[in-house]
Image (cartoon, helix red, strand yellow):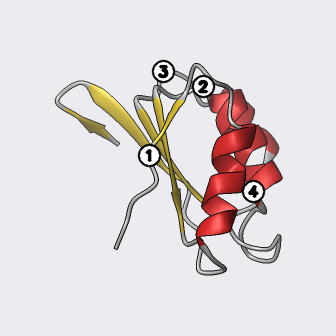
Amino acid sequence: MTINGARFYHAGDTDFIPEMKEIKNIAVAMVPIGIGVLAMNPAQAAAAVNSIKPEIAIPMHYNFGQQQAEKFKLLVNKDIQVEIMEG
């Protein structure tokens, strides 16, 4: 979706699918993190974000603990800002 000229990508619950490699010019990408069932594990989610190359990446659905989000952050390219939401 595009809001005020900024493009947002919400992956929903998914795997790292080949079509993600075609997504470009994204300001904010929201990606799910799970244990690799119905959602990507931290390494898969980071690979997806690294291929999309958004300005900001936000992990979501990491119900298996804050550690999952932190693992994701460590694997994302350093030129992509990762925002871990609290609450």
Q: Residues within 10 Å of mark 1 (few under 14, many from 20)?
A: some
Q: Nearer the viewer, residue 4 or 69?
A: 69
Instruction: Determine whether the residue tagged by mark 4 lies in a helix, strand or loop.
Output: helix
Estimate the x, y position of residue 52 in percent, counting from the top left: 63, 30
Estimate the x, y position of residue 41 in percent, counting from the top left: 78, 62
Which residue is rendered at x = 81% and y = 77% of the image? 37
Q: Residue beneath label 2, please?
A: 53
Q: Nearer the viewer, mark 3 or mark 1?
A: 1
Q: Residue beneath label 1, please?
A: 83
**Separation of disc 2 and disc 4 at Cα?**
16 Å
Which residue is rendered at x = 55% and y = 72% of the image? 61
Which residue is rendered at x = 58% and y = 19% of the image? 79
Hey, which quadrant is residue 86 in on the image? Answer: bottom left
**Separation of disc 3 and disc 1 at Cα?**
18 Å
Residue 42 circle label: 4
**Separation of disc 4 and disc 3 at Cα?**
23 Å
Sequence-first tag of 2 and 3: 3
Hey, which quadrant is residue 51 in on the image? Answer: top right
Estimate the x, y position of residue 40 in percent, counting from the top left: 75, 62
Apparent side of residue 58 relative to residue 7 in the rendered image (left or right): right
Q: Contact (CB < 8 A) between labels 3 and 1?
A: no
Q: Amino acid at mark 2?
A: Lys
**Separation of disc 1 and disc 2 at Cα?**
14 Å
Residue 25 circle label: 3
